[in-house]
Amino acid sequence: MPQPRSRSNAARLMGLSVALAATWLVVLPWLGRQPAVRAHIERNESQGIDPTAKFYTETESTRHALTRLHSLERREPGALWAASNQTGAPGISSSRAGLIDED
């Protein structure tokens, strides 16, 4: 005969499974139909962005940015590291990095 504790664990597992299934099958599809989320999905689809592959390490723009970063590091060692930010902690100085294209 099962112990009372194992029954409560089974009940928790069942509750968690139901909650996960409800989220996956009801809540997420509902969110996907909301105008703001739908617009984002349609924008990604129109640009050919695969939402299951949101890792941009192999895209052309990433290679371009890394090339610019390495070039900047060679020209000005330490340029990406500001002495401190407003909290006094070390941080990256994006304004000096020149990473944002203005065209």
Image (spheres, rainbow, N blue to C red):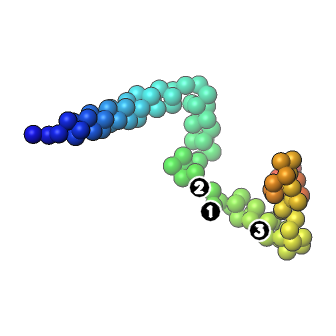
Q: Around disc 2, counting alpha carbons within 10 Å, would you say few (fewer than 14), some (14 to 19), or many (20 or more)?
A: few
Query: Which dot, 2 or 1, sits closer to the camera?
Result: 2
Res. 10 in view: no
Question: Residue 99: image x %, image y %?
Answer: 82, 56
Which element is circle 2 on?
Answer: loop
Label whose residue precedes the other's in the sequence (1 or 3)? 1
Foreground pick, 102 / 5: 5
Which element is circle 1 on?
Answer: loop
When the figure is inspected, residue 69 is found, relative to residue 54, above or below; the finding is below
Q: Around disc 3, counting alpha carbons within 10 Å, would you say few (fewer than 14), some (14 to 19), or many (20 or more)?
A: few
Res. 91 in view: yes
Question: Residue 52: image x %, image y %?
Answer: 51, 49
Is residue 38 left or right of 74 when viewed as pictured?
left
Q: Quadrant of residue 40?
A: top right
Which amino acid is tagged 2? Phe
Which amino acid is tagged 1? Glu
Question: Residue 94: image x %, image y %?
Answer: 83, 54
When the figure is inspected, residue 31 is found, relative to residue 68, above or below; the finding is above
Foreground pick, 32 / 6: 6
Residue ID at (58%, 31%): 37
- Residue located beneath label 2 in the image: 55
Which element is circle 3 on?
Answer: helix
Question: Residue 74: image x %, image y %?
Answer: 85, 74
Kindly report the distance in space between the C-alpha atoms of the residues bearing marks 3 and 2: 18 Å
Label whose residue precedes the other's in the sequence (3 or 2)? 2
- Residue located beneath label 3 in the image: 67
